[in-house]
Image (cartoon, grey):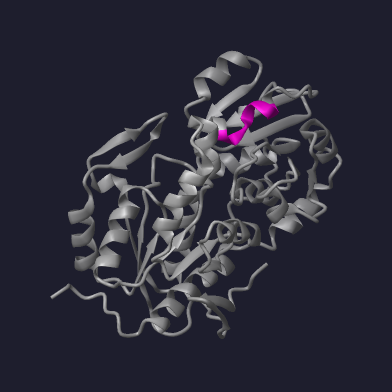
Amino acid sequence: MDDGSLTATRGTDRLTAPVTLSSRRPVRILTVTDAWHPQVNGVVRTIEATHRELQRAGHECDAITPREFATVACPGYGEIRLSLLPYRKVARRIEDWEPDAIHIATEGPLGQAARRYCVRHAVPFTTAYHTRFPQYLRAMFGIQERWVYRFLRWFHTPAWRVLTPTAEVERELAAWGIRHVARWTRGVDLDVFRPRGEPSPLVEGLAHPRFLYVGRVSVEKNIEAFLKLDLPGSKIVAGVGPALELLGRRFPDVRFVGVLEREELAQLYSSVDAFVFPSLTDTFGLVMLEALACGTPVAAFPVQGPIDVVGGSDAAALDTELRRAALRALRIDRARCRAWAERFSWQAATEQFLAQQRSVRADAPDTALARPG
């Protein structure tokens, strides 16, 4: 895992001293995100966890989210709200709050408005690549990937850093001409996600072995590959999304439990025998770390995401045959799963994030985030 000491500048890699969360002066960081509650996904969890760690260390954080704007539902995905004509309000928020650093987390209307402001006023900023939109839009709507990568190249090129969770994502973006990337890995809250002794009431009456999926219930997550498996015992799905109603009708024997609070989710992870991650398009897969932290082994395809998170570990079974992986996962020692998850902490991930924000400021010392004159 990258420890945050290597940061990439425009066209040059350079080494800097590691930055701890509490070192040097406090920083005011503004995050702009189109992904926010009521969505429950890796983007939202990453922003919340990062802000929580930064604030614990004395830094100031704020977020511009769709809750501040008039919105419409995203076509084909009603849970995602798209902000309408946000530029003036985004610009005013940036100027009023006067952040030391701006991080644009998503490529939607709010992200585009913040990008426009920063480019117009020569303000340095970072972006993040959380979602493999080219693969997602191909799966959902048949849109050609090269068109989406063209948009992503346009969006991310002005950023001083494009923060990516794994080396594989970095290689993927570089292949499409997005090269000024830097590592920002992910973590797991080891205090919340831990083995629980009391079984979840959500699994009452379900036969062992119990197999669980957690995440968006949508086409790009490839959930049907899991639900169609001929497995002993029971299957459980936690989450919501546009495919929920259809899958509920097609698989009446599966227990769908909706969206859960973190404590409820940790108890559910602890109450199942294996966590099945069928996605072929995720950049990382935070839910795998949550399951492992609760002592639950992971079964997945050997693709980007699972390979980066659990590849080479003894806490997961990766196989091109998902059924075979799920059955192999049942034989994994649960103590090994927890031990692997303990390698990932939000404090370490947030130190990487903070180091990138500070290095951007160091590279552009003459650029002020004051109100334009």
Residue 56's quadrant in the figure? bottom left
Question: Whole-percent x and y of residue 130?
Answer: 51, 52
Quarter of the image where the C terminus is located: bottom left
Q: Is residue 4 above or below residue 64?
A: below
Question: Whole-percent x and y of residue 210?
Answer: 73, 30
Q: Is residue 300 above or below residue 310?
A: above
Q: Nearer the viewer, residue 367 or 295?
A: 367
Kindly identify the residue that appears in the image at 45 percent across and 57 percent down.
Answer: 153
Residue 58's quadrant in the figure? bottom left
Kindly identify the residue that appears in the image at 30 percent across and 46 percent down.
Answer: 66
Q: Nearer the viewer, residue 22 or 1?
A: 1
Kindly identify the residue that appears in the image at 39 percent across and 57 percent down.
Answer: 155
Q: Is residue 24 above or below residue 308?
A: below
- Res. 260 in view: no
Query: Main SS of the magenta segment?
Result: helix
Q: Is residue 85 magenta?
A: no
Q: Is residue 220 above or below residue 254?
A: below
Quarter of the image where the N terminus is located: bottom right
- Residues in magenta? 220-226
Question: Whole-percent x and y of residue 32?
Answer: 35, 57
- Res. 135 in view: yes
Question: Whole-percent x and y of residue 219?
Answer: 55, 30
Q: Is residue 221 magenta?
A: yes
Residue 251's quadrant in the figure? top right
